[in-house]
Image (tube, rainbow, N blue to C red):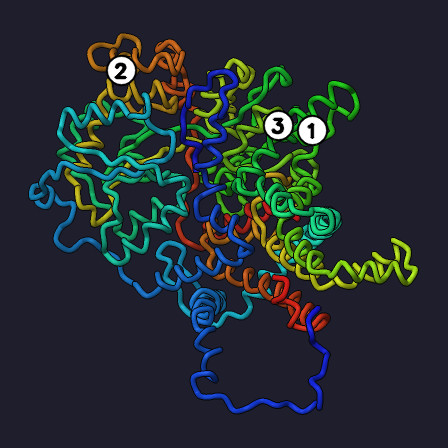
Amino acid sequence: MQDQHSPQPESGDSALDPSIWRGLTQRRMSRRQMLAATGTGAGALGVSAFLAACGVKGASVGSHSVKAGGVGSASWWAKQKLHHTVNFANWPYYIDVLSGKHPTLEHFTNLTGIQVNYTEPISDNLPFYAKIRPSLQAQQYTGYDIIVMTNNSPPLGYLINYGWLTPLDQGAMVNFHKYASPLVTNTSWDPGNKYTMAWQSGWTAIGYNSSIIKDPGSSVDILFDRRYSGKVGMMADPQELGSLGLLAIGVEPATSTESDWAKAAKKLQTQKSDGIVRAYYDQDYINHLKNGDTVVSQAWSGDIFQADLNSKYRDLHLLIPEEGGMFWTDNMCIPAYAQNPKDAMTLMDYYYLPEVQAVVEYYNDYVCPVPKAQGVLLHPTGWAEQTLKAMHPSIGLPYSTTAHALTVFPNAQYKANSRNYYKYKSQEELTAWNNLFLPITQGA
Amino acid sequence: MTHSEGVAPPGGATRRRRAPLGKALAPYLLSLPAGLWLLALFLVPMVVMLSLSLQSCNFGTGACVMTWHFGEFWQQVSLYHSQFLVSIYFAGAATIIDLVVSFPIAYWIAFYGGSKKNFFLLMLLVPFFVSFVIRTIVWEFILSDQGIVLGTLKSAHLVPQNFHVLATGYAVVAGLAYNYLPFTALPLYVAIERIDKTVLDAAYDLYASKREAFTRVILPLTIPGLFAAFLLTFIPALGDYVNQQILGGTSDTMIGTVIQNAFLTNLDYAGGSALSAVLLAIALVGIFAYARLLGSRTIEEYL
C-alpha cells in the first residue's frame, strides 16, 4: 500500500517522470487489472469471474499450522544449510539502484556467495497475499524466501495467525540486535521480532504546496479547510482514510472504538459533501500534488522527500501534524515452506549493517531502521564510500542531506508524533471498519 | 440480412434430403471447440461466481462456506444502486457520443475511402495499439488543472482559475468515449461498407434528396450495425473501472470500481460476486432486448 519507490533520478524534465513508472507498477494497474482492462470487452465481468474461481479453490483447503516438526525452533534452524540462493520479493523502487543493478545485493553476493533473485511483485498487500495464499494453504513453497508486508494492512496479521510465517532464527540476527532502531524492535505487531525484521518505515502525513499555502499550521485541520475546497487530496485506502478521520476528531487510532470510527466517518463524509475533497487517490496522489491539481493532500513521507529532489517541486513540504502522523513499517518475513530459509536469514541480517543501510537510504529516503547509518552517510569509508560516490551523479544530492533528513533519521519530536494504526481483533471489526470508510471513497 | 433471405424457394416446399450421419454431425463437431471454450471460460466461471455470491467467506483464509445467503444480492444492490445508475448513465452517454462521432468516420471511410480504406482503418486504430491504461493516464496529465491545455487557457484568462476538468463526471464520460471508440467505429464501418452503393443511385433516380436518401435508405440499412456497435461499446463501458479511478472525482464512482474494491481491498468475494452477477444480468437484458428488436440473426453478422 505504501508508495514504496524512490528517486528514479528526477532530473528536470526527463522523458519519463517516475510517477509514470509508479503508475505502471502500482496497484491501480496491476497486470491482472491491465489484462482485464484491455481485454476485448470482458472488463470487470471477466476479472470478477476469474477471482471468484480462485476463491472457491481456496475453500477446499482448511487447516493451516506449521507447528509440526518444530519449524523455526532452534534445533530446526541448526539443521538448515545454505543453498547459496535466495528469492526475495519486494515492492517496486524500494532498493538502491546503480546502472540497473542493486549495489547492496551485489555486495551481499560477494561477501557470502549467495545469489539473490530480487523481484518486485508486491504492489499492494492484499492482492499479493491473495496470490501466495493458495500455495501456503497447499503447504507448498510460494516461490519466495523473503516477502515484505506492511504492518498496517491485515495480511501480515493473517500470515502470523495462520502459522504461515517461519519463525526467525534469533541466533542469526546478530546485526539486528546490535544496530536496529527501537522503532522497529519488539514492535506491537510482532512482539520480540519473532517473525519480522523491518525493511523500511515511513509516515502517512500531510503534503502541501508552500507556494499557495503559506500558513499550514500544525494540525490535520488543514485537510478540512474550506479555503482549499476542491483542492484537497485524500487517500482511497480505508486504513489511511479512517486513521486520518480518527486523528481529526482527536482520537488515537490505535486505541479507538467502533463508536469513534462512526464519528470519524461522519467527519470525513461531511468533508466530502462540503466539496472540500477533490478525489480519493491511490499512489497517484503525488502526481496531482505535483501538478497543482491538489494543494494539500494526505501523503507518504518518502514521496515528498523524493519530489523535493526535483527543483520543480521544491514547494512541496511534509507536515507531520500535532495530532500525529501515522507510522507504518514494511516488514521482511520468511513465508512458511520457504526452501532457502538460512540464506534468507543471512540476507535479512545483512541489511542491518549500517554501511548497507546508508546506501539503501541514500536512494530510498524512507525511515531507516538502523540509526548508525547516519554516521556512515556523514563519513563514509571503504565499500560504502565507493558505492555512494558512484551513485552520486544520478541522485545529485550531498550524502549529508539524507543524513540530516528528519524523515530518514527522525528526532525525538518526530518519534513522539508517530501514531500506530488500529489492529483489528477480528474479521467482524475489519468489516465494520471497511463498511464505514469504503463507502466514503465510493460515492455516487 | 442483405442476402437472399425472404426469397422463398420456388414451389415453397422444402426439398431437403436426409443427410448421412457424418454430415449431420458436422455442425456439432465444428462448433465443439467454440462450445468447449464457452463452457470452460464462460459458463463454468459464471456458475462459480453465482455460487460464490451465496457463500460466506473468511477474509484471511479465503475459505468459503455455502450458506445460500440470497440476502447478499439485496444488500449489495441497496448499498450500491446509485453506483449502478451512474455506470448506466455514464456508459450510455459515452456510447451515444461514440455513435455520433464514429458514424461520419465510418461512413466516410466506407464511401470515400477508395483503395485506401484499409489505411484509414489502420489510422483509426493505431492510437489504440497503446494500452488502455497508459492512454488514460496521459489524458490525466494533459487535462490537469495547470497542465498544457487548462494552464494555457487560464493564463489567457479564457476560463476561470478554479475551472477543472479532472475529477468530474464529464472527464469520466469523455475518457470512456475515447477509450471505447473503436468498438463503435468498426461494427459501424462493417455495416455501412456492405451497403450496395447502387441503392443510393436508385434512390436518387427516384427523386430522393440527399437527406432523404440518407434517412430512408442508408440509415435503415445500418440499424443492425448501430445496435451491434451500441452493445459492443455499452457493455464493456458499463463494467469499466479504470477511467473513473483515473479521471473521476468523489461522487461519480462506477460499479466496476466498487467490484474491484470488493475483491481487492475488502477481500469480500461474496459481495463482489453478487455485484458482478447483477452487472451481468443488466448486460444480458441489453442483449435480449436487442435480440427481440432485431432478431438474433443480425447479431452475429455484425459482431
Front one among A257 and B48: B48
Amino acid at pointer 2: Thr
Q: Is residue B11 visible?
A: yes
Mark 3: which amino acid? Thr
Number of the front mark, 1 or 3: 3
The chain under label 3 reads A
Q: Compared with residue A118, is residue B91 higher up or lower down, i.e. above or below?
A: below
Q: Is residue B294 left or right of residue A207?
A: right
> Could you tell me which chain the residue with mark 1 belongs to?
A
- Number of other residues with Cα within 10 Å of mark 1, as a class: few under 14, some 14 to 19, many 20 or more: some
Asked if both marks, 2 and 3, belong to the same chain, the answer given is yes
Report crowding for label 3: few under 14, some 14 to 19, many 20 or more residues within 10 A (C-alpha): many
Q: Label 2, label 3: how many angstroms apart (C-alpha)?
A: 37 Å
Give the letter of the chain under mark 2: A
Foreground of the two, A156 or A22: A22
Q: Amino acid at mark 1?
A: Arg
Q: CA distance from mark 1 to mark 3?
A: 13 Å
